[in-house]
Image: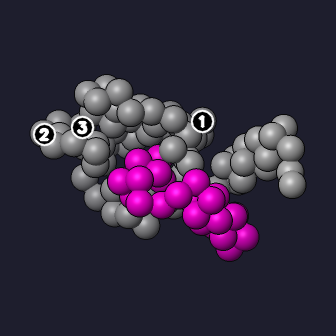
Amino acid sequence: MMDKNKLRLAIDYIQEKVDFEEILKERHLLDDAMPSSNGEIKMKCFAHDDRTPSLSVNIYTKRFHCFSCGMHGRILEFLKEYNYHVLGRRTSISYLVDEMLR
């Protein structure tokens, strides 16, 4: 069994290698988004009824934050939230590994 430090390093490495922008494109979340030159993208939050863009995603730091509902985190948390907690942690990690190996 892998110890917690090795697991954390592996997860960090995977999250670093995955293209956050590609994840957004695959889910058609960039269709109505407002990108900026600094890598930040504003869009409507998928976790609640959003009339104006409140979800901010930074494709360089690979972090997101919704200023309405407070949801925030990195790619793995984004995937878990996006899939409404249907995917388990291991399934999300497997998805990230598959993305990295493409």
Q: Whole-Å distance between the Cαs marked 2 and 1?
A: 26 Å
Q: Position of residue 2 (x, y in %)?
A: 86, 51
Could you say which is closer to the camera, residue 84 or residue 99? 84
Q: How many residues crowd mark 2 within 10 Å: few (<14), some (14–19), many (20+)?
A: few
Could you say which is closer to the camera, residue 3 or residue 28? 3
As for residue 87 lying within the magenta part, the answer is yes
Q: Position of residue 50 (x, y in %)?
A: 17, 40
Amino acid at pointer 2:
Arg
Give the vertical position of 61 relative to 19 (above or below): above
Q: Residue drawn 72% across and 53% down?
A: 14
CB under 8 Å between callouts 3 and 2?
Answer: no
Tell me the element at label 1: loop
Whether residue 54 is visible: yes
Q: Residue drawn 58% across and 54% down?
A: 89
Give the vertical position of 76 relative to 61 (above or below): below
Q: How many residues crowd mark 3 within 10 Å: few (<14), some (14–19), many (20+)?
A: some
Q: Whole-Å distance between the Cαs marked 3 and 2?
A: 7 Å
Q: Residue reaching furthest front?
A: 1
As for residue 7 lying within the magenta part, the answer is no
The circle drawn on residue 53 is 3
CB under 8 Å between callouts 1 and 3?
Answer: no
Q: Residue reaching furthest bottom?
A: 102
Main secondary structure found in the magenta portion? helix
User: Which residue is the site of mark 2?
Assistant: 51
Q: Position of residue 49 (x, y in %)?
A: 16, 43
User: Which residue is the site of mark 1?
Assistant: 61
Amino acid at pointer 3:
Pro
Tell me the element at label 3: loop
